[in-house]
Amino acid sequence: MIQKCTEIPEKIPGISDVCPNISELIQNGNIYMVDYELLDNVKDDIIHGHRQYLAAPIVLLQETAQGLMPIAIQLKQKPGEGNPIFTPNKENPEAEAWLLAKIWVRNSDFYIHELVSHLLKTHLLAEIFFVSIFTSLHDHHPILRIFAVTGRYTIPINVAARNTLTNDTGFFKEYTGFGKDAQCKVLERAIKNLTYKSLCLPDNLKIRGVQNLKNYHYRDDAMQIWDAISEFP
């Protein structure tokens, strides 16, 4: 989800007031952003009579010698008086407001990771390819033979997930702020953002501007796998 900022984000027009040197940092290529807009206006759930709450934060991070460090957090998508920009307190780096803002971000990150990165882009897409290959290719086709080995657990795992995790009485409904309607809403939004290039790692990295981001282990590890697959005869 990390992407390089090439200009001050329109969703955070007040960032210059709390980070006066933000324009210079962006110009130098040191500012990155993570935007959880998929969670915007998603209906939260009620668990045992208690209303749950969701945030759709925007996080700005600065690339430093120590790696990416968060420098600003806005918890809602639309700027306004009731939507302040939280920044680290230099006198007390773990000031309560900043710590709570970071907790909200981690909470939002959990939802996006589990529903989009994990469930959608891993399990559900794999099931689509798995079923398509098994219904389209000859029994002796080499690709089908590879999938027969690597994908043999795909369907059982996905069936189990639908029966225990994402159903009306599953884990997400019972133990998180996400009801079933919210799950479907986020998945619908996420699938609309999927493109062929977004699934091609080199193109994805280029679009997000993270080719040269230091200590970006996701890119480094994933490119090794991508290159290995590309060398298949």
Image (tube, helix red, strand yellow):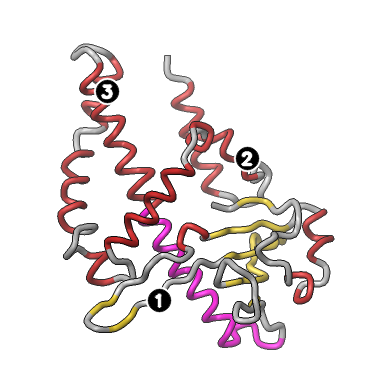
Cα–Cα span, label 3 and label 2:
29 Å
Q: In the image, residue 46 lies at what x, y percent? A: 28, 77
Q: Which mark is residue 207?
A: 2
90 part of magenta stretch:
no
In front: 191, or 119?
191
Cα–Cα span, label 3 and label 1:
41 Å
Instruction: Give the labeled residue for mark 3.
Output: 133
In front: 116, or 230?
116
In front: 112, or 45?
45
Cα–Cα span, label 1 and label 2:
32 Å
Question: For the residue marked with disc 2, what is the amino acid?
Answer: Ile
Question: For the residue marked with disc 1, what is the amino acid?
Answer: Tyr
Instruction: Give the labeled residue for mark 1.
Output: 53
At mark 1, the secondary structure is loop
Q: In the image, residue 192 lies at what x, y percent? A: 45, 43
* Quarter-of-image position of residue 204: top right
Q: Which comes sooner in the sequence, label 3 or label 2?
A: 3
Q: In the image, residue 168 lies at what x, y percent? A: 18, 62
Residues rendered magenta in the picture:
91-115
Q: Is residue 5 left or right of residue 162?
A: right
Q: Which comes sooner in the sequence, label 3 or label 1?
A: 1
Q: Which mark is residue 149?
A: none
